[in-house]
Amino acid sequence: MKIFASGAIALFAIFGLALFITQSTAKANASGGRKIVVFNDALNDSVKDEIVARAGGSNLKNLDLISAKVVWLPSRAAAEKLKSHPAVVRVEEDIIVEALARKAGGGIAIPPPQVLPWGIDRVDAELVWPGGNTAGPVKVGIIDTGISNKHPDILANVKGGVNTINPRKNWNDDNGHGSHVAGVVAALNNATGVIGVGPAADLYAIKVLNSAGSGYLSDVIEGIQWAIANNMQVINMSLGTTSNIQSFHDAVIAARSAGLVTVAAAGNSGESVNFPAAYPETIAVSATDHNDTLASWSSRGPEVDLSAPGISIYSTYKGTGYATLSGTSMAAPHVTGSAALVLNTPVGSYDANADGRWNPSEVQKKLQDRAIDLGASGFDNLYGWGLVNAYAATL
């Protein structure tokens, strides 16, 4: 897959999901190192700390969302000791997150005149805005490499954020991927650059990956934890792993239970859907081209829920730049922005639990019901229920 040049940026790499998680070389529990230790819910924090200390470990951070701690263990023996403790549910590898992409330079010095990117046009988002729905003030968390803290085409929509890698630092994007995703969701409707699906949505930068696109799974889980605590309504995860880690699934379940619409990129292997997209609690998104055909590299399978434009997507980038990227990473935010628009409409006949408010399953059902059917009639493993259509979903 090629990443096409835009402005002063030339990217030739597989960016795609662009940030997909690969396991570290260590096998699970084969040695010491960084682990996620899940405890019995009944224990208080001090008791958990004592159990870790008695095994010779040190606490790195808490993941209260899943009753876990991220710890450093000195040896395999320490890991085995923790595994055998009756108060410990499981000990898992804190797998490494990797970005398989070539680095690129900064953006252009003078912003270009505003254009309507083809993907935004293809999902008919621009037909929604004249009615007054521009997705504001729906709260959207971008769980990624951060968002540029100086980009004039998105900064006004960024209302806050967090850096789970290092909480003493800010959430600025020093990679580019997160800013690109954020622009697809909610780039401003102004005179320059691009415009997003929901150009007035409130964006929150949840930085879980560093400048190299690398980070620990625990940082992603902490990002989900932050999103729940700060009342996000939609979260976008354009990242994934081929490993089914139970702690990851538990965090996604918690997000869904808390009422967050969770959108995830399906993956770029051309094979099975990655996690977290493969979890039933997410909306898994595959990538299509200008002809509404599935990209050859887009992951596929029964877990796919929707498809969206994912090839040659022009959007904001790190600093004040713009870039054209491809991947399911770019497809997912088209669905995220569409979900934000839906949340700004009356729930109406989709109010399955009669509470007068949208919940994640209701939002997902409407997006699926109003999608444009592609491929085999009805649901299929390539496009899910079809190409997301923001306009139809808001009627």
Image (tube, grey):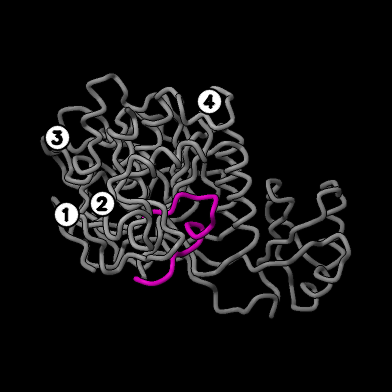
Q: Give me the residue at 81% from left, 49% from top.
A: 41
| Residue type, mark 4 in image | Arg
Does the CB distance between marks 3 and 4 fall below 8 Å?
A: no
Q: Amino acid at mark 1?
A: His
Q: Which segment did they paint magenta?
A: 270-285
User: Which residue in the protein does label 2 denote?
Assistant: 309
For residue 348: magenta?
no
Q: Nearer the viewer, residue 52 or 288?
A: 288
> 51 or 68, which is in the foreground?
68
Q: Residues within 10 Å of mark 3 (few under 14, many from 20)?
A: some
Assign a secondary structure to mark 3: loop
Question: Up-down: is 372 above or below 49?
Answer: above
Crowd rating for badge 4 (residues with CA inside 10 Å; few <14, some 14–19, many 20+): some
Q: Identify residue type, mark 2.
A: Pro
- In magenta segment, residue 275: yes
In terms of sequence position, does the residue under pointer 3 or pointer 4 come before the other? Answer: 3
State the CA–CA distance, disc 3 to disc 4.
35 Å
Q: Which residue is mark 1?
A: 290
Q: Which circle, 1 or 3, is nearer the viewer?
A: 1
Identify the amino acid type marked 3. Answer: Gln
Q: Which residue is mark 3?
A: 114
**Residue 158 placed where, x, y %?**
39, 32
Mark 2 vs mark 3: in front: 2
Q: Earlier in the sequence, mark 2 or mark 1?
A: 1
Residue 357, label in figure: 4
Looking at the image, is 348 positioned above or below residue 222? above
Image quarter in which the C terminus is found: top left
Measuring 35% from the left and 54% from the top, which residue is drawn there? 378
First-in-chain label (1 vs 3):
3
Q: Secondary structure at mark 1?
A: loop
> Residue 183 appears at what percent x and percent y?
30, 41
